[in-house]
Amino acid sequence: MSEMADIRCEGADTVDAIMPVMDSAFDPIFGEAWTAAQCFGMLTIPGTDLLVARYKGAIVGFALLRSLLDETELLLIAIHKDHQRKGLGKQLARAVIEHAKNRGAKMVFLEVREGNTALSLYLHVGFVQVGKRESYYRGKAGEYFNALTLRYEITP
């Protein structure tokens, strides 16, 4: 059964509150989670937004995105592990696209580790693979993982 979240753009004062989602959603073996300081720092850059998903009042997910001219880059997206596979990721990804469209973007880009289970979500909402970077991510144990570059074209 799908859960429906309330998704809104929130400020840097919410960063500490999203960290439990960050810790839950990203497996430490891959080293993909950001620190609160990294999130705060990114939010000081003009055009960067934080979308926060709440379910029954609790923060269950977030997306960090940066827009410049007619492009938006999805930097991070996460759903707390207790709320995954319930439709919230799809809802949040679609909210990112809508937010980008409202900012005047014609395309949304993201990079995802090859093998990441979120890849099927991105493809389901309409992203297509447009590139691959060999050995782009470095895991905690020093191993390397490929990155896939995906693009969503926003139609007028």
Image: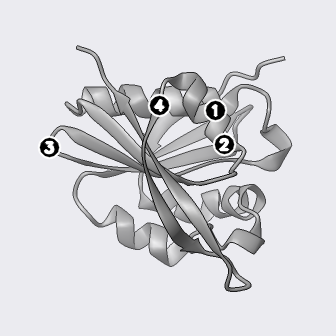
Q: How far separated are the C-alphas under marks 4 and 1?
A: 9 Å
Tell me the tag on residue 154. Answer: none
Work out whether residue 135 or residue 21 is closer to the camera in this orientation and state it. 135
Identify the amino acid type marked 4.
Phe
Q: Residue at x 70, y 55 (%)?
A: 21
Q: How far separated are the C-alphas under marks 3 and 1?
A: 26 Å
Q: How far separated are the C-alphas under marks 2 and 4?
A: 12 Å
Height in image: 34 above or below 82? below
Specify whether 119 is left or right of 49.
right
Question: Residue 150 location in percent, x, y?
Answer: 44, 42
Tell me the tag on residue 121. Answer: 1
Identify the amino acid type marked 2.
Ala
Specify whether 132 is left or right of 84.
left
Q: Quadrant of residue 87?
A: top right
Q: Quadrant of residue 40?
A: bottom left
Identify the amino acid type marked 1.
Leu
Secondary element at image label 4: loop
Q: Which of marks 3 and 2 precedes in the sequence? A: 3
Q: Nearer the viewer, mark 3 or mark 1?
A: 1
Residue at which label 3 appears: 69
Q: How far separated are the C-alphas under marks 1 and 2?
A: 5 Å
Residue at which label 4 appears: 127
Dot 1, how many residues are within 10 Å of its Cα: few (below 14), some (14-19), or many (20+)? some
Secondary element at image label 3: loop
